Amino acid sequence: MTDRPSAPSPTPGRKPRRGGRRVLRILLLTVAVLVLAAGGAGWWAYSHLNGNIDSVDLDQAIGDNRPKKVVPGAQNVLVLGSDSRAGANADLDHGDVSGARSDTAMLIHLPEGRSKATAISIPRDTLISRPECKDSDGKTVEGADRVMFNSVYSLAGPACVVKTVEQMSGIRVDHFVEVDFAGFKGLVDALGGVTVTLDKPMSGAKGGLKLDAGTHRLNGTDSLKFVRTRYGYGDGSDLGRIGLQQQFMMAMLSEIKKQDALGSPARLYKLADAGTKSLTTDSELASLTALSDFAQSMKGVNPDTMETIMLPVAYDKVDPNRVVVAQPQAGRLWEALRTDQAIPADAKKSPATANKG
Protein backbone atom coordinates (compact mmCIF):
# COMPACT_ATOMS: atom_id res chain seq x y z
CA MET A 1 0.00 0.00 0.00
CA THR A 2 1.17 3.50 -0.81
CA ASP A 3 2.18 5.54 2.24
CA ARG A 4 0.65 8.99 2.18
CA PRO A 5 -1.18 11.38 4.50
CA SER A 6 -4.60 10.26 5.52
CA ALA A 7 -7.62 11.94 3.97
CA PRO A 8 -11.25 11.73 5.02
CA SER A 9 -12.73 8.43 3.89
CA PRO A 10 -16.41 9.00 3.10
CA THR A 11 -16.79 5.28 2.41
CA PRO A 12 -15.42 3.11 5.27
CA GLY A 13 -12.85 0.48 4.33
CA ARG A 14 -11.86 1.94 0.97
CA LYS A 15 -8.12 2.14 0.40
CA PRO A 16 -7.20 5.79 -0.25
CA ARG A 17 -4.77 5.13 -3.06
CA ARG A 18 -7.45 3.71 -5.33
CA GLY A 19 -8.69 7.24 -5.89
CA GLY A 20 -5.63 7.99 -7.97
CA ARG A 21 -6.20 4.85 -10.02
CA ARG A 22 -9.69 6.04 -10.84
CA VAL A 23 -8.37 9.47 -11.82
CA LEU A 24 -6.14 7.87 -14.46
CA ARG A 25 -9.00 5.68 -15.63
CA ILE A 26 -11.19 8.74 -16.06
CA LEU A 27 -8.41 10.55 -17.93
CA LEU A 28 -7.97 7.62 -20.32
CA LEU A 29 -11.71 7.07 -20.62
CA THR A 30 -12.28 10.73 -21.44
CA VAL A 31 -9.73 10.53 -24.25
CA ALA A 32 -11.43 7.38 -25.53
CA VAL A 33 -14.84 9.10 -25.43
CA LEU A 34 -13.53 12.03 -27.46
CA VAL A 35 -11.94 9.81 -30.10
CA LEU A 36 -14.90 7.45 -30.46
CA ALA A 37 -17.36 10.32 -30.65
CA ALA A 38 -15.34 11.95 -33.40
CA GLY A 39 -15.13 8.72 -35.38
CA GLY A 40 -18.85 8.03 -35.11
CA ALA A 41 -20.21 11.49 -35.84
CA GLY A 42 -18.27 12.36 -38.95
CA TRP A 43 -16.12 15.31 -39.98
CA TRP A 44 -18.54 17.99 -38.75
CA ALA A 45 -18.56 16.49 -35.27
CA TYR A 46 -14.77 16.07 -35.34
CA SER A 47 -14.29 19.72 -36.29
CA HIS A 48 -16.77 20.88 -33.66
CA LEU A 49 -15.17 18.87 -30.85
CA ASN A 50 -11.68 19.76 -32.04
CA GLY A 51 -12.60 23.43 -31.92
CA ASN A 52 -13.70 23.10 -28.29
CA ILE A 53 -10.14 22.41 -27.10
CA ASP A 54 -8.06 25.39 -25.99
CA SER A 55 -4.25 25.21 -25.98
CA VAL A 56 -1.08 26.87 -24.71
CA ASP A 57 2.34 26.75 -26.39
CA LEU A 58 4.56 25.89 -23.42
CA ASP A 59 7.89 26.47 -25.16
CA GLN A 60 6.84 29.93 -26.27
CA ALA A 61 5.31 30.83 -22.90
CA ILE A 62 8.12 29.48 -20.72
CA GLY A 63 11.19 29.94 -22.92
CA ASP A 64 14.40 27.92 -23.00
CA ASN A 65 15.14 27.90 -19.27
CA ARG A 66 13.61 24.49 -18.62
CA PRO A 67 14.96 21.22 -17.16
CA LYS A 68 16.55 18.80 -19.59
CA LYS A 69 15.01 15.39 -20.11
CA VAL A 70 17.09 12.73 -18.39
CA VAL A 71 15.26 9.65 -19.71
CA PRO A 72 13.94 10.37 -23.24
CA GLY A 73 11.40 7.53 -23.17
CA ALA A 74 9.69 8.71 -19.97
CA GLN A 75 6.81 11.20 -19.97
CA ASN A 76 5.55 13.63 -17.32
CA VAL A 77 2.05 15.09 -17.63
CA LEU A 78 0.74 17.86 -15.34
CA VAL A 79 -3.02 17.55 -14.82
CA LEU A 80 -4.74 20.68 -13.48
CA GLY A 81 -8.27 21.12 -12.20
CA SER A 82 -8.98 24.85 -12.54
CA ASP A 83 -11.80 26.56 -10.66
CA SER A 84 -13.25 29.96 -11.52
CA ARG A 85 -15.96 31.66 -9.45
CA ALA A 86 -16.10 34.81 -11.56
CA GLY A 87 -18.88 35.94 -13.91
CA ALA A 88 -21.42 33.26 -14.82
CA ASN A 89 -19.62 30.70 -12.70
CA ALA A 90 -20.56 32.71 -9.61
CA ASP A 91 -24.11 31.42 -10.06
CA LEU A 92 -22.77 27.92 -9.44
CA ASP A 93 -21.42 28.81 -6.01
CA HIS A 94 -21.47 31.46 -3.31
CA GLY A 95 -20.46 34.92 -4.46
CA ASP A 96 -18.47 36.41 -7.28
CA VAL A 97 -14.72 35.99 -6.75
CA SER A 98 -12.37 37.36 -9.40
CA GLY A 99 -9.95 35.14 -11.26
CA ALA A 100 -9.50 31.38 -11.31
CA ARG A 101 -7.50 28.96 -9.25
CA SER A 102 -5.79 25.64 -9.81
CA ASP A 103 -7.53 23.71 -7.04
CA THR A 104 -6.17 20.34 -8.12
CA ALA A 105 -2.68 19.62 -9.45
CA MET A 106 -1.22 16.20 -10.16
CA LEU A 107 2.02 15.29 -11.94
CA ILE A 108 1.63 11.91 -13.65
CA HIS A 109 4.92 10.14 -14.38
CA LEU A 110 4.91 7.52 -17.15
CA PRO A 111 8.19 5.60 -17.09
CA GLU A 112 10.03 4.40 -20.14
CA GLY A 113 8.00 1.60 -21.69
CA ARG A 114 4.67 3.06 -20.42
CA SER A 115 3.78 -0.08 -18.44
CA LYS A 116 2.80 1.71 -15.22
CA ALA A 117 2.25 5.21 -13.85
CA THR A 118 2.81 7.26 -10.70
CA ALA A 119 0.70 10.30 -9.77
CA ILE A 120 2.02 13.00 -7.42
CA SER A 121 -0.64 15.30 -5.93
CA ILE A 122 0.51 18.82 -4.96
CA PRO A 123 -1.59 20.38 -2.15
CA ARG A 124 -3.01 23.76 -3.17
CA ASP A 125 -2.03 25.43 0.14
CA THR A 126 1.67 24.59 -0.23
CA LEU A 127 3.91 27.67 0.17
CA ILE A 128 6.37 27.77 -2.72
CA SER A 129 8.76 30.10 -4.57
CA ARG A 130 7.14 31.33 -7.79
CA PRO A 131 9.58 31.98 -10.67
CA GLU A 132 9.36 35.00 -12.92
CA CYS A 133 6.78 34.27 -15.61
CA LYS A 134 4.93 35.74 -18.57
CA ASP A 135 1.16 35.94 -18.17
CA SER A 136 -1.36 35.25 -20.95
CA ASP A 137 -0.92 38.82 -22.23
CA GLY A 138 2.86 38.49 -22.39
CA LYS A 139 3.44 40.76 -19.39
CA THR A 140 6.19 39.86 -16.92
CA VAL A 141 5.08 38.62 -13.50
CA GLU A 142 7.91 38.94 -11.00
CA GLY A 143 8.96 35.96 -8.93
CA ALA A 144 8.03 35.75 -5.25
CA ASP A 145 8.69 33.57 -2.20
CA ARG A 146 6.19 32.02 0.21
CA VAL A 147 3.16 32.21 -2.06
CA MET A 148 0.41 29.58 -2.17
CA PHE A 149 0.78 27.10 -4.99
CA ASN A 150 -2.78 27.60 -6.27
CA SER A 151 -2.27 31.38 -6.54
CA VAL A 152 0.21 30.88 -9.40
CA TYR A 153 -2.56 29.95 -11.83
CA SER A 154 -4.78 32.92 -10.96
CA LEU A 155 -1.90 35.38 -11.24
CA ALA A 156 -0.02 34.14 -14.30
CA GLY A 157 -1.86 31.22 -15.92
CA PRO A 158 -1.17 27.53 -16.58
CA ALA A 159 2.23 27.97 -18.27
CA CYS A 160 3.53 29.56 -15.07
CA VAL A 161 2.17 26.60 -13.08
CA VAL A 162 4.15 24.30 -15.37
CA LYS A 163 7.27 26.45 -14.89
CA THR A 164 6.75 26.45 -11.11
CA VAL A 165 6.45 22.65 -10.99
CA GLU A 166 9.56 22.32 -13.15
CA GLN A 167 11.46 24.64 -10.79
CA MET A 168 10.21 22.74 -7.71
CA SER A 169 11.05 19.32 -9.07
CA GLY A 170 13.79 19.71 -11.64
CA ILE A 171 11.60 17.54 -13.89
CA ARG A 172 10.73 18.43 -17.48
CA VAL A 173 6.94 18.57 -17.94
CA ASP A 174 6.18 17.13 -21.38
CA HIS A 175 2.44 17.87 -21.48
CA PHE A 176 -0.31 19.45 -19.44
CA VAL A 177 -4.05 18.86 -19.38
CA GLU A 178 -6.42 21.30 -17.66
CA VAL A 179 -10.06 20.57 -16.88
CA ASP A 180 -12.25 23.50 -15.85
CA PHE A 181 -14.46 22.55 -12.91
CA ALA A 182 -17.34 24.74 -14.12
CA GLY A 183 -17.25 22.99 -17.49
CA PHE A 184 -17.21 19.76 -15.52
CA LYS A 185 -20.78 20.65 -14.46
CA GLY A 186 -21.96 20.04 -18.03
CA LEU A 187 -20.35 16.61 -18.06
CA VAL A 188 -22.19 15.61 -14.87
CA ASP A 189 -25.50 16.91 -16.24
CA ALA A 190 -24.92 15.00 -19.48
CA LEU A 191 -24.76 11.85 -17.33
CA GLY A 192 -27.97 12.81 -15.55
CA GLY A 193 -26.16 13.21 -12.23
CA VAL A 194 -23.68 11.31 -10.07
CA THR A 195 -24.41 9.38 -6.85
CA VAL A 196 -22.21 9.83 -3.76
CA THR A 197 -22.42 8.38 -0.25
CA LEU A 198 -21.31 10.19 2.91
CA ASP A 199 -20.70 8.50 6.26
CA LYS A 200 -21.19 11.81 8.08
CA PRO A 201 -23.07 15.04 7.27
CA MET A 202 -21.68 17.90 5.22
CA SER A 203 -22.54 21.08 7.11
CA GLY A 204 -22.66 23.63 4.29
CA ALA A 205 -20.17 25.88 6.09
CA LYS A 206 -19.21 29.12 4.33
CA GLY A 207 -21.99 28.79 1.76
CA GLY A 208 -21.04 25.27 0.72
CA LEU A 209 -23.20 22.23 0.06
CA LYS A 210 -25.30 20.88 2.94
CA LEU A 211 -25.99 17.14 2.92
CA ASP A 212 -27.06 14.60 5.51
CA ALA A 213 -25.11 11.39 5.98
CA GLY A 214 -26.22 8.82 3.43
CA THR A 215 -26.59 8.51 -0.35
CA HIS A 216 -27.33 11.49 -2.61
CA ARG A 217 -27.82 12.00 -6.34
CA LEU A 218 -25.98 15.21 -7.29
CA ASN A 219 -26.63 17.32 -10.38
CA GLY A 220 -23.87 19.33 -12.04
CA THR A 221 -24.27 22.40 -9.83
CA ASP A 222 -24.19 20.43 -6.57
CA SER A 223 -21.33 18.26 -7.86
CA LEU A 224 -19.27 21.39 -8.39
CA LYS A 225 -20.02 22.49 -4.82
CA PHE A 226 -19.16 19.00 -3.58
CA VAL A 227 -15.65 18.99 -5.05
CA ARG A 228 -15.09 22.55 -3.79
CA THR A 229 -16.15 21.74 -0.22
CA ARG A 230 -13.50 22.25 2.41
CA TYR A 231 -14.75 23.77 5.67
CA GLY A 232 -18.04 21.89 5.83
CA TYR A 233 -16.65 18.37 6.02
CA GLY A 234 -14.03 16.52 8.08
CA ASP A 235 -11.31 18.66 9.60
CA GLY A 236 -11.74 21.45 7.04
CA SER A 237 -8.20 21.13 5.71
CA ASP A 238 -6.99 21.34 2.13
CA LEU A 239 -5.42 17.92 2.54
CA GLY A 240 -8.80 16.55 3.61
CA ARG A 241 -10.58 17.93 0.54
CA ILE A 242 -8.46 15.65 -1.62
CA GLY A 243 -10.47 12.73 -0.24
CA LEU A 244 -13.78 14.23 -1.35
CA GLN A 245 -12.46 14.94 -4.85
CA GLN A 246 -11.19 11.39 -5.16
CA GLN A 247 -14.54 10.00 -3.99
CA PHE A 248 -16.38 12.04 -6.59
CA MET A 249 -14.07 10.86 -9.38
CA MET A 250 -14.75 7.24 -8.35
CA ALA A 251 -18.51 7.87 -8.34
CA MET A 252 -18.40 9.49 -11.75
CA LEU A 253 -16.50 6.58 -13.26
CA SER A 254 -19.05 4.19 -11.75
CA GLU A 255 -21.87 6.20 -13.37
CA ILE A 256 -20.20 6.10 -16.80
CA LYS A 257 -19.78 2.33 -16.51
CA LYS A 258 -23.34 1.76 -15.24
CA GLN A 259 -24.86 3.72 -18.12
CA ASP A 260 -22.66 2.01 -20.72
CA ALA A 261 -22.01 5.49 -22.11
CA LEU A 262 -19.62 4.16 -24.74
CA GLY A 263 -22.40 2.02 -26.20
CA SER A 264 -24.71 4.92 -27.09
CA PRO A 265 -23.55 7.19 -29.95
CA ALA A 266 -25.92 9.99 -28.94
CA ARG A 267 -24.87 9.93 -25.30
CA LEU A 268 -21.25 9.51 -26.33
CA TYR A 269 -21.33 12.68 -28.42
CA LYS A 270 -23.10 14.60 -25.64
CA LEU A 271 -20.40 13.59 -23.13
CA ALA A 272 -17.59 14.36 -25.56
CA ASP A 273 -19.03 17.79 -26.34
CA ALA A 274 -19.32 18.62 -22.63
CA GLY A 275 -15.84 17.24 -21.89
CA THR A 276 -13.97 19.11 -24.60
CA LYS A 277 -15.63 22.41 -23.66
CA SER A 278 -13.80 22.23 -20.33
CA LEU A 279 -10.43 21.11 -21.74
CA THR A 280 -7.17 23.01 -22.25
CA THR A 281 -3.91 21.29 -23.21
CA ASP A 282 -0.42 22.14 -24.38
CA SER A 283 -0.25 22.83 -28.12
CA GLU A 284 1.13 19.37 -28.94
CA LEU A 285 -1.99 17.66 -27.52
CA ALA A 286 -4.56 20.18 -28.75
CA SER A 287 -6.46 17.96 -31.20
CA LEU A 288 -8.50 14.78 -31.04
CA THR A 289 -5.88 13.07 -33.20
CA ALA A 290 -3.04 14.00 -30.86
CA LEU A 291 -5.06 12.96 -27.81
CA SER A 292 -5.85 9.66 -29.51
CA ASP A 293 -2.20 9.00 -30.34
CA PHE A 294 -1.18 9.81 -26.78
CA ALA A 295 -3.88 7.51 -25.38
CA GLN A 296 -2.70 4.71 -27.68
CA SER A 297 0.85 5.14 -26.38
CA MET A 298 -0.50 4.59 -22.85
CA LYS A 299 -2.48 1.44 -23.63
CA GLY A 300 0.10 -0.69 -21.78
CA VAL A 301 -0.57 1.13 -18.50
CA ASN A 302 -2.57 -0.97 -16.07
CA PRO A 303 -4.56 1.41 -13.81
CA ASP A 304 -4.57 -1.23 -11.06
CA THR A 305 -0.80 -0.89 -10.71
CA MET A 306 -0.82 2.90 -10.59
CA GLU A 307 0.72 4.45 -7.49
CA THR A 308 -0.67 7.67 -6.01
CA ILE A 309 1.45 9.78 -3.67
CA MET A 310 0.91 13.19 -2.14
CA LEU A 311 3.95 15.43 -2.32
CA PRO A 312 5.54 15.23 1.16
CA VAL A 313 4.67 18.41 3.05
CA ALA A 314 5.04 19.68 6.62
CA TYR A 315 3.01 22.31 8.48
CA ASP A 316 4.55 25.74 8.15
CA LYS A 317 6.13 26.97 11.41
CA VAL A 318 4.96 30.55 10.85
CA ASP A 319 1.43 29.80 9.60
CA PRO A 320 0.14 26.35 10.69
CA ASN A 321 -2.75 26.71 8.21
CA ARG A 322 -0.24 26.36 5.37
CA VAL A 323 2.20 23.63 4.44
CA VAL A 324 5.71 23.67 3.00
CA VAL A 325 7.56 21.08 0.94
CA ALA A 326 9.14 18.55 3.31
CA GLN A 327 12.80 17.77 2.82
CA PRO A 328 14.63 15.50 2.28
CA GLN A 329 11.57 13.41 1.36
CA ALA A 330 10.44 15.57 -1.57
CA GLY A 331 13.96 15.81 -2.99
CA ARG A 332 14.26 12.02 -3.03
CA LEU A 333 10.84 11.68 -4.62
CA TRP A 334 11.60 14.14 -7.43
CA GLU A 335 15.03 12.59 -8.06
CA ALA A 336 13.51 9.12 -8.45
CA LEU A 337 10.97 10.39 -10.98
CA ARG A 338 13.53 12.49 -12.83
CA THR A 339 15.81 9.49 -13.31
CA ASP A 340 12.98 6.99 -13.84
CA GLN A 341 13.91 4.94 -10.78
CA ALA A 342 11.87 3.25 -8.04
CA ILE A 343 10.70 5.71 -5.38
CA PRO A 344 12.23 5.06 -1.93
CA ALA A 345 9.66 4.25 0.78
CA ASP A 346 10.76 7.18 2.95
CA ALA A 347 10.18 9.59 0.04
CA LYS A 348 6.46 8.78 0.13
CA LYS A 349 5.92 9.77 3.76
CA SER A 350 4.57 13.21 4.64
CA PRO A 351 4.88 14.86 8.09
CA ALA A 352 1.56 16.69 7.52
CA THR A 353 -1.72 14.76 7.51
CA ALA A 354 -5.37 15.59 7.06
CA ASN A 355 -6.04 14.96 10.73
CA LYS A 356 -3.96 17.57 12.50
CA GLY A 357 -5.10 19.15 15.69
Image (cartoon, rainbow, N blue to C red):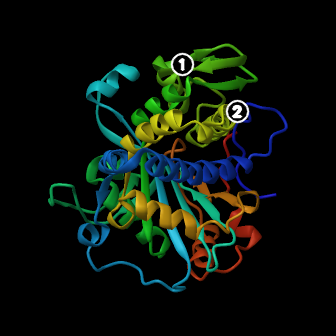
Residue 192 appears in the rendering: yes
Determine the residue positioned at 62% across, 15% down: 211
Whole-percent x, y for residue 271 in the image: 49, 37
Judge from the rendering whether residue 46 lies leftward or rightward of residue 124; answer left or right. left
**Mark positioned earlier in the residue sequence (2 or 1):** 1
Say few, some or many: other residues with alpha carbon within 10 Å of mark 1 (under 14 / 14 to 19 / 20 or more): many
Whole-percent x, y for residue 147 in the image: 38, 53
Foreground residue among 30 and 206: 30
Foreground residue among 202 and 158: 158
Res. 258 image quadrant: top right
Labelled disc at residue 209:
1
Labelled disc at residue 25:
none
Q: Name the element at disc 2.
A: helix
Say few, some or many: other residues with alpha carbon within 10 Å of mark 2 (under 14 / 14 to 19 / 20 or more): few
Whole-percent x, y for residue 28 in the image: 58, 54
Determine the residue positioned at 47% across, 22% down: 221
Q: What amino acid type should be assigned to the residue bearing mark 1?
A: Leu
Closer mark to the observer between disc 2 and disc 1: 2
Determine the residue positioned at 59% across, 62% down: 326
